[in-house]
Amino acid sequence: MAASTRPQVLALYRAMLKESGKFSSYSYRTFAIRKIRDTFRENKNMLNPEGIQVLMDKASENLEIIRRQVLIGHLYEAKKLVVESKELH
């Protein structure tokens, strides 16, 4: 990975994790975070600049999808799940 690309990849990774943490649904939130981490780990050894750019473009598109879904999720919030409650009985 080129030195100038690494900070861009890390910034995109952090942005995706941060935005995914905003999902109101526990299930969506945990799935998105796990999927992002797994996908970035899977591709961390990619050296092909063209391949890196393709993955970056796809991740940028997915970041926009996450942002839209978070917005929609906040419009139609459901009750919190038991695993999300702060008080344990």
Image: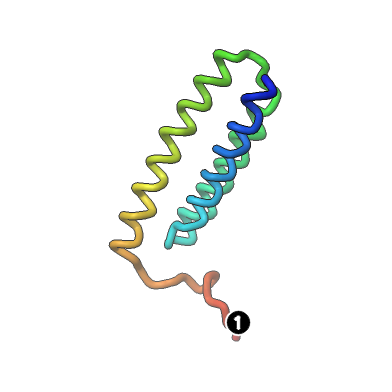
Q: Residue at x 53, y 76 (%)?
A: 85
Q: Is residue 55 left or right of residue 65?
A: right
Residue 78 place in picture, x, y as percent: 35, 68
Closer to the camera in the image, 64 or 40: 64
Is 14 rendered above or below residue 4? Answer: below
Q: Which residue is depicted at the point 55% across and 37% down? A: 12
Q: Is residue 43 above or below residue 65?
A: above
Q: Residue at x 49, y 32 (%)?
A: 59
Q: Is residue 7 above or below residue 3?
A: below
Residue furthest front in the image: 4
Badge 1, how many Cα within 10 Å: few under 14, some, many 20+?
A: few
Circle 1 — which element?
A: loop
The quadrant of the rendering that contains the C terminus is: bottom right
Snapshot colouring:
rainbow
Type of amino acid at the residue the image marks with label 1: Leu
Task: Give whichever of 73, 6 is nearer the camera.
Answer: 6
| Image quadrant in which the N terminus is located | top right
Q: Which residue is mark 1?
A: 88
Measured as percent of width and height from the top left, residue 29 is found at: 50, 55
Judged left or right of residue 89, residue 27 is left
Q: State the residue in front, 4 or 24.
A: 4
